Amino acid sequence: MAERQHGRAGGTVVAAGLMACVCLGSAGCGSPGSAAEDPVHTLHEAADALVDAKSSKARTSMEMATGGTRVTIRGEGVYDYTRQLGRLRVLLPQDPAGRTEHRPITELLAPGALFMKNRGAGVPADKWVRVETATLSDGNLVTGGATDPFAAAEVLRGTRSATFVGTTDIAGTEVWHYRGTADLSAAARGASRGARDSLAAAAKGFATSVVPFDVFLDEEGRIRKIRHRFSFVNGRHRATVAVASTTLLYDFGVPADVRLPAEEDIYAGRIAEE
């Protein structure tokens, strides 16, 4: 079936909306080690630490079990936290025979919007599909196959409970590990203007607004790794599906020249449901 695509998305985006990770940091608390005394406050301020870091490279992974098969979507790119703009190259899963069914999708992340190229389903190869993230039932924490790193960090503004687990090592860097739960409604109220409506949509659209997470901060309070566990209701079968979204952040301060497409390069036709 077909669907009108013009500043809205339904449920047909990316891999038919297969899935969502994040990044945090700690500001105003000295080192994350001292923040063990007040982990909830540390995590409330984590998104601000990313803005201080200015930019980074990012790797994303989104996993879900469907039809008895575990599906993984991976992404890699850069993010500019000062402008809340990112670019990811998203790899969709292979078919059971090991063949890749789809070309990589280029995704541009912006406040309130997701742009995709190589979307397929009749979209011209040189055109972008634009989706207003507030129209998605998950606020694009899952639909695009990769969670917007800054939106994922802003989920932590809704942290209700958290504990300091201990220190560990990620890629040769000592990190401080926190585990807790965040409430998406509270996160939306405290989020930046660009993420507020999307997080509010997710709070209403997910099976539960409570999101368990694990996050790892380096000694400067920057997120090195974050893992969220989202739950949503499968529209066709009305079954609750669990999605694990993981984001790795590294190479802070790298150039992140992300440019959004011109209006004439955005596809306003019809896309087929995959």
Image (spheres, rainbow, N blue to C red):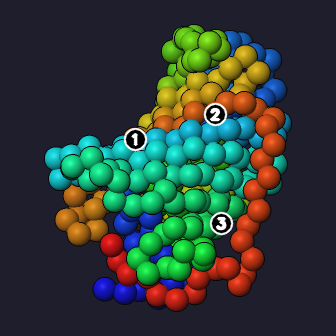
Mark 2 residue type: Leu
Residue hosting label 1: 244
Residue hosting label 3: 112
Residue 109 picture location, percent across and down: 65, 59
- Pointer 3 local density, CA inside 10 Å: few below 14, some 14–19, many at least 20: some
SS label for mark 1? strand
Mark 1 residue type: Ala
Residue 221 picture location, percent across and down: 72, 24
- Decide which of tag 3 and tag 1 comes sooner along the chain: 3
Residue 20 picture location, percent across and down: 47, 49
- Decide which of tag 3 and tag 2 comes sooner along the chain: 3
Residue hosting label 2: 249
Front one among 124 and 187: 124
- Decide which of tag 2 and tag 1 comes sooner along the chain: 1
Q: As drawn, is 88 to the left or to the right of 67?
A: right
217 lies above or below 135: above
For the residues bearing labels 3 and 1, Cβ distance under 8 angstroms: no
Cα gap from disc 2 to disc 1, whole angstroms = 17 Å
Mark 3 residue type: Gly
Cα gap from disc 3 to disc 2, whole angstroms = 22 Å
Front one among 197 and 92: 92
- Pointer 2 local density, CA inside 10 Å: few below 14, some 14–19, many at least 20: many
Residue drawn at point x = 41 percent, y = 48 percent:
73
- Report which quarter residue 44 is drawn in: top right
273 lies above or below 219: below
